[in-house]
Image (spheres, coloured by chain):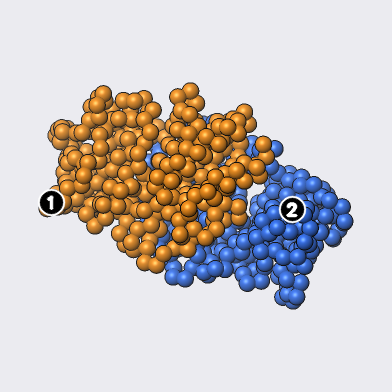
Chain colours: A blue, B orange
Amino acid sequence: MREFDVIRRIASLAAQRKSHPALITGIGDDCAVIQPAARTDLVFTTDFLIEDRHFKHETHTARAVGHKALARSLSDLAAMGAEPVFCLVSVALPPHRTSRWIDGFYRGVLALADQHRISLAGGDLSQADRVIADVMCCGSVPRGKALLRSGAKPGDRIFVTGKLGRAAASNWRVKPVPRLETGISLRGLATAAMDLSDGLSLDLRRLCLASGVSASLTGKLPIASGATLDQALHGGEDYELLFTARSSTRKRIAGSTEVGVIQSGEPGLILFEGKPLLPGGFDHFA
Amino acid sequence: MREFDVIRRIASLAAQRKSHPALITGIGDDCAVIQPAARTDLVFTTDFLIEDRHFKHETHTARAVGHKALARSLSDLAAMGAEPVFCLVSVALPPHRTSRWIDGFYRGVLALADQHRISLAGGDLSQADRVIADVMCCGSVPRGKALLRSGAKPGDRIFVTGKLGRAAASNWRVKPVPRLETGISLRGLATAAMDLSDGLSLDLRRLCLASGVSASLTGKLPIASGATLDQALHGGEDYELLFTARSSTRKRIAGSTEVGVIQSGEPGLILFEGKPLLPGGFDHFA
């Protein structure tokens, strides 16, 4: 199959969808063209999904790989409180992968894209020894309203959505669900936010470093059924949201649990039940 | 070296630069945040650069790889007539690549970024068997002024910038120069435009298919010194601009050569000296 035919098929799959009103020109030109709405900021993220690192051929169907590749980047939009606008999906794959596999991959991408009304606007195709996908997502927020990691203040309460350790307990086979609606509901409420991609211990440390604060976790974590405490603290890939809010905030965010408090200690130091917690999450270069 | 340290070093290199005024939040959060200027469209492209496919470790220094990774995407901005705004640079590399290599790679990226005033706003880092870079670039154009592939009409003249076959003749060792200033000067003048990444024969076919036209090339191509006709027609990676303009256009675009005329024949058909020319350029899935 020639690259041109693959692109034509993907473009035809994408064209069957109603595209985001901001998308003027999609797949097929040198660039996608976007007309940003007035008084909005745009947010951008990009994430690799690499065979034998983030998924295995034996346990993940092509559709599951496509789903996960897009879900990882959508989760970053959720962390900013952004609404999805468009994505660029690039994939390099071994020559022995069939056109059926490529089709399945893009169907996985597009099924999740349809759910969250994000348009597939372009990407790149190439060959590699193993499958490597790279997905760039763009989202929009009202001007100045993006949720950052850097706004947590001593006294703020720490929250997480959902249950922790679910991905690790399933041996990373569960389909990640990006928390986009929750992210949007956090605008103007969360003082800091990020998504839990590498585990609570490592990600909370990052949030604290960005905010120049420390944190104390209580022992009462929302642990997923079947998961261990270790998996809940360090498991990674849960794609839940981690956020902070003023202690005076009375509004409850549905599906979230208070897990600790921000303190004015050594930046990045995390206490768990009073003792220092070493970051044990996923580090690509460890 | 841990991922966090690598990111911190890259962020520190990027922070030494004056960032684009549209960039509100750069490296270090879940997403980069951009505040688009009023009455502009934004254009987006992403391109892989893969070891042993687009470069070789033996012949390309880390800096040359960084330069080429960014240049490929900048060339797509040039093709749209866009001014560079920001880029996201992702790289997956084998564990045996030293921190010196990573440093060199990013210095190559940033040296070219400085030349064209594009801000490094984020990316991703991971591991792979061979180096795979994926660079996303965003550019801006006045609203409605992006140059597309689809506007060529019968009678329009066909032009290319620079000399063709230069990359092939050098065995792909020359540093590509993205034609950003030329691209901007084509706004309101070119009826269609794209960059020459895969060779004139294949890329002109794509432009003609997008415009629903055919083309006739004259024998008078601007062939690079040392290159063969075959390299000029099919070589690829020249990153010059291919564009069409009304025959009535009297304004000359500096450094460009007229090479043919658009015709109302079978869409995508290219004649060279009157005979059908088969696309012989680079196809990642051929």
The answer to whether residue A94 of the structure is visible from this angle is no
Q: Nearer the viewer, residue A45 or B204?
A: A45
Image coordinates for residue A174, horizontal then vertical, percent: 69, 50
Q: Dot 1 falls on which chain?
A: B
Please give the residue where the numbered disc 2 appears in the rendered image: A268
The quadrant in which residue B169 appears is top left
Horizontal arrangement in the rendering, residue A145 relative to residue B275 (left or right)? right
Q: Residue at x 17, y 41 (%)?
A: B258
Q: Residue at x 70, y 44 (%)?
A: A282
Q: Residues within 10 Å of mark 2 (few under 14, many from 20)?
A: many
Q: Amino acid at mark 2?
A: Gly
- Single out the mark in the foreground, 2 or 1: 2
Image coordinates for residue B89, horizontal then vertical, percent: 51, 45
Q: Nearer the viewer, residue A203 or A114?
A: A203
Say which mark, if any, is on residue B250. Answer: 1
Q: Residue at x 45, y 56 (%)?
A: B20
Quarter containing the N terminus of chain A: top left
* Tag 1 secondary structure: loop
* Tag 2 secondary structure: loop
Quarter containing the C terminus of chain A: top right
The quadrant in which residue A164 appears is bottom right
Image coordinates for residue A149, horizontal then vertical, percent: 65, 59
